[in-house]
Amino acid sequence: MIKQVKLKNVRNLGEYNVAFFPGINILLGKNGAGKTSVLEAIYFISFTKSFKAQRDIDMLKQGKDHFQICVEWENESVKQAQGNFLKPNEKRFIMDGETMTRFSDVIGIFPLVFQSPEDFRITAGGSSERRSYFDRFISQISKNYLQDLIQYRKLIKNRNAHLKERNALKRYTYTDQLEAYDIQLSPLMFRIVQARKVYNELFNRHLEMIYSSVFNGAVTANIRYSPSIYADSEPDFRIRHLERTQQNIEQEIALRRTLWGPNYDKYVFYRNDTPLIHYASQGEHKIWMTILKLAEGEIISEGSGREPVFLFDDLFAELDVSNSRRIIERVLKKKQALITTTDLNDLRRHGLDTANGDIHIIEMEKQKK
């Protein structure tokens, strides 16, 4: 659990300290008060980057040359976590006084489930948004997956550079260099696909249970995962992969990019056997995403024995009252959840009893520039 967050020069926050408690913590304030910035800072400490900014410098308070984030945790292997950024592009993470030499070692230290309005892109956007979502999630709980993904992306970048060289030379044949890349890529791709398949099955199991309890069995939900290349064994996968690339090498060189692999896998979300993207309202997208996040938490708890901290940015936007009451019942059972809002009355309409002793209201004033 999170005990305290100390921020310096993050977004519009100069110096800001806030303590958190077990149970539900409500960050209450007007737009511009910095509620989302607090959640963004916690996310940064856990994933080494922002969930909304393309560049770290975009999190920096205007006119400053550095920002610092300090988070104190309880009942975790690391008690004190610090993230520092210095212009133009230097950042460092320190865990219990030890500087982390690799950012990838930071990911997964603190179990975290995060939801924001931007997550609408995951359910309503293209396949790349869903791939990125599942990659972030699996990387948080599987170091092997994260390392395979990092190595895969490096090799694909190098392979694509070679394809561009072949294109510039107008030579459309398979080379020894391409074969060397593909031999290295095949086992990585196989492991990535296998891991995605396993976690997809886990998500479907938990989605079924949560949807059944929320909608009394009247609504079903599932995720269908379709890899661009698949085989049950690594040797068969390697054969299929090499055949595919060699047969289509002219097309790859012409387009100057690799056309097969995990970066072309597809995830489709279904509600009552109909693709969510085809018909769902904004409210239905929000319900689907919220239940998906609850499933995330169940999978993390089941696999690690550690319940994650839940961060909900503007949870009740686009969420209808009748369905949100059932979801709130589940959120109230979490060890710790941080929820932002601009209106306590909105929380009460959705069934959150703000007089409950396990609900802590933290008021944030709008920051002066």
Image (cartoon, rainbow, N blue to C red):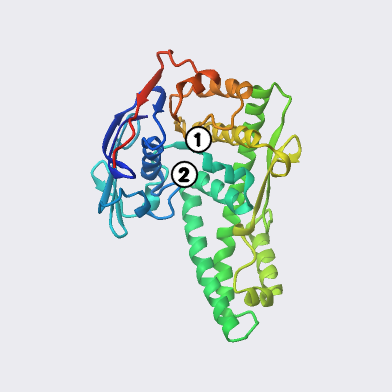
Which residue corresponds to the image point at 54% horizontal and 22% vertical from the top-left? Answer: 328
Whether residue 274 sits left or right of residue 339 in the image: it is: right
Q: Amino acid at mark 1?
A: Ile
Rendered position, 64 above or below 272: below
Rendered position, 81 above or below 358: below
- How far apart marks 2 and 1 lie (CA) works out to 9 Å
| Disc 1 packing (10 Å; few <14; some 14–19; many ≥20) | many
Which residue corresponds to the image point at 28% horizontal and 57% vertical from the top-left? Answer: 87
Q: Nearer the viewer, residue 144 or 322?
A: 322
Rendered position, 110 above or below 194: above
Image-quadrant location for residue 68:
top left
Q: Amino acid at mark 2?
A: Gln
Q: Position of residue 184 (x, y in %)?
A: 54, 66
Rendered-image quadrant of the C terminus: top left
**Residue under circle 1?**
300
Q: Position of residue 214 (x, y in %)?
A: 64, 23
Q: Position of residue 215 (x, y in %)?
A: 68, 23
Q: Nearer the viewer, residue 291 or 203?
A: 291
Q: Earlier in the sequence, mark 2 or mark 1?
A: 2
Rendered-image quadrant of the N terminus: top left
Which residue corresponds to the image point at 40% horizontal and 13% vertical from the top-left? Answer: 357
**Residue under circle 2?**
140
**Element on which disc 1 rests:** helix
Q: Position of residue 141 (x, y in %)?
A: 48, 42
Tag 2 near tag 1, CB within 8 Å: yes
**Element on which disc 2 rests:** helix
